[in-house]
Image (tube, rainbow, N blue to C red):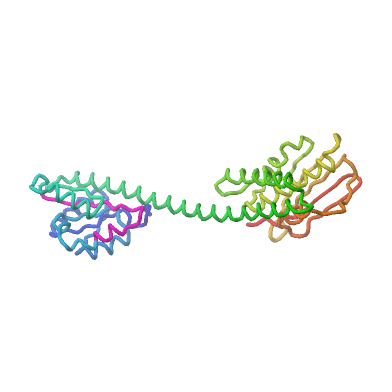
C-alpha cells in the first residue's frame, strides 16, 4: 500500500468538458497513474477525504464560484498537507493572464498551470512532480506523528524521572539519609543509567552495562557474571541505585575497604517464575566480618524497594562477608 493509503497516489479530475477528463484519464493511465473523475467540486472534496496524489481541474472551473468547496478544503487542510493542483489553462500569453494566475495561487495554493494544447509527456512530467511532492508531504505527516509520539513518551518518562529524583532527594536529605553528598552520588548513578537508556531506540539497557557503568571507579576487585538481559527504564534506574548503594556501603564498611577484599556480582533468569524474574546476588569476601547495622536509613530502603521484586530482598551478615540477593520481576 502506498504511503498515505491506497488512494494516496491517484489523480482527482474535474473539468467542464467530458473530453478534457477523458484525455487526462487516458494519458495518466498510460503512465500508470490511477485517476477518478468528479462531476462537481463537492464530489471532488469528498474524494479528497479518501486520499489523493494531486488534483487536475480546468481553468474555467477554477475561476467560477463553484470551486468554493475546493478552496475551503485547501484552506482547512492539515499543516503537513499542500495538495498539488494542476490547472489546465488556455493560452498563457493572453491579456490578464498574470493577474489570473496570481489569483489562482492565492485561492488554491500549490498550483501548476499547464497550457493547452499540451503534449502528453508534459502532463505526465507535471503529474510525477506532483506525486513526488505529495509523497514528501505524507512522509512529513508520518514524521510529525512519530515526533508527537516521542514527545508524549518523553513527557511521561520525564515525569517518572522527576518523581524518582524527588524521592531520592526526600530520602537523602532527611535525618539518616546521608545528606547532600549521598544525594549527589545517587543522582550520578541515576544519570549514568539514563545515559545508557538514551543510546537505544527502545529505551532499554543491558543489566551488565548498568552494573559496569555504576561500578566504574570502585576498583577492579569486582567480578561480574550473567547473561544478557535488557531492562526497561524503571528497572534499569532501580538497579543503578541498588548497585550504587551496595558498592558505596562496601567501600565504607565492607570488602572494598580491604586490599584482599573482593565482590562477586551474579545474575540469571528464573524462567520458571511467573512472570519471569531475575535472580541477582552481591557477595563480598575477604573484608571485615559483616555486622548488621543498628540503624537502617534511606540506603536500606533503596536496597529493599528500588527494584520491584518477587519477594523481599535477602541480607546476610556473616563473618566471611556481607551478601545481598533479590528476585526482581522482569516486566514484559
* Residue 195: % across, % down: 61, 43
Residue 218's quadrant in the figure? top right
Q: Residue at x 26, y 62 (%)?
A: 45
Does the stretch in magenta take in 71? yes
Does the stretch in magenta take in 115? no
Residue 107's quadrant in the figure? bottom left
Q: Residue at x 32, y 50 (%)?
A: 134
Q: Is residue 289 left or right of residue 53?
A: right
Q: Which of the pair 134/322 is nearer the observer? A: 322
Q: Is residue 73 left or right of residue 189?
A: left
Can you say whether 225 is above or below 58 in the image? above
* Residue 138: % across, % down: 37, 51
Q: Which residues are magenta?
A: 70-90
Q: Which of the pair 167/281 is nearer the observer? A: 167
* Residue 254: % across, % down: 84, 43
Can you say whether 195 is above or below 235 in the image? above
Total numbered labels:
0
Q: Residue at x 92, y 46 (%)?
A: 319
Q: Is residue 58 left or right of residue 168?
A: left
Task: Indicate the quadrant containing the C terminus: top left, top right, bottom left or bottom right.
Answer: bottom right
Q: Which of the pair 195/286 is nearer the observer? A: 195
Task: Indicate the quadrant containing the N terminus: top left, top right, bottom left or bottom right.
Answer: bottom left
Amino acid at each position: 500500500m502506498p504511503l498515505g493509503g491506497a488512494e494516496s497516489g491517484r489523480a482527482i479530475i474535474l473539468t467542464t468538458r467530458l473530453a478534457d477528463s477523458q484525455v487526462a484519464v487516458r494519458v495518466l493511465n498510460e503512465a500508470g497513474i490511477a485517476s477518478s473523475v468528479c462531476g462537481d467540486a463537492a464530489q471532488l472534496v469528498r474524494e479528497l477525504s479518501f486520499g489523493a496524489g494531486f488534483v487536475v481541474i480546468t481553468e474555467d472551473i477554477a475561476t467560477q464560484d463553484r470551486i468554493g468547496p475546493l478552496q475551503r478544503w485547501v484552506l482547512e487542510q492539515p499543516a503537513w498537507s499542500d495538495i498539488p493542483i494542476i490547472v489546465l489553462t488556455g493560452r498563457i500569453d493572453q491579456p490578464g493572464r498574470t493577474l489570473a494566475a496570481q489569483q489562482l495561487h492565492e485561492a488554491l495554493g500549490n498550483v501548476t498551470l499547464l497550457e493547452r494544447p499540451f503534449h502528453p509527456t508534459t502532463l505526465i512530467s507535471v503529474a510525477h512532480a506532483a506525486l513526488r511532492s505529495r509523497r514528501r508531504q505524507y512522509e512529513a505527516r508520518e514524521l510529525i506523528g512519530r515526533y508527537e509520539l516521542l514527545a508524549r513518551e518523553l513527557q511521561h518518562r520525564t515525569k517518572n524521572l522527576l518523581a524518582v529524583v524527588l524521592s531520592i532527594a526526600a530520602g537523602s536529605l532527611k535525618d539518616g539519609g546521608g545528606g547532600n553528598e549521598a544525594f549527589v552520588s545517587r543522582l550520578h548513578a541515576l544519570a549514568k543509567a539514563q545515559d545508557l537508556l538514551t543510546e537505544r531506540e527502545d529505551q532499554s539497557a543491558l543489566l551488565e552495562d548498568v552494573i559496569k557503568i555504576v561500578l566504574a571507579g570502585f576498583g577492579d576487585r569486582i567480578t561480574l557474571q550473567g547473561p544478557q538481559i535488557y531492562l526497561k527504564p524503571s528497572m534499569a534506574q532501580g538497579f543503578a541505585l541498588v548497585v550504587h548503594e551496595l558498592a558505596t556501603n562496601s567501600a565504607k564498611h565492607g570488602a572494598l575497604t580491604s586490599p584482599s577484599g573482593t565482590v562477586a556480582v551474579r545474575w540469571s533468569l528464573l524462567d520458571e517464575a511467573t512472570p519471569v524474574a531475575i535472580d541477582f546476588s552481591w557477595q563480598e569476601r575477604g573484608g571485615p566480618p559483616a555486622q548488621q547495622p543498628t540503624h537502617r536509613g534511606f540506603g536500606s530502603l533503596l536496597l529493599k524497594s528500588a527494584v520491584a521484586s518477587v519477594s523481599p530482598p535477602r541480607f546476610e551478615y556473616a563473618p566471611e562477608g556481607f551478601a545481598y540477593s533479590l528476585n526482581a520481576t522482569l516486566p514484559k
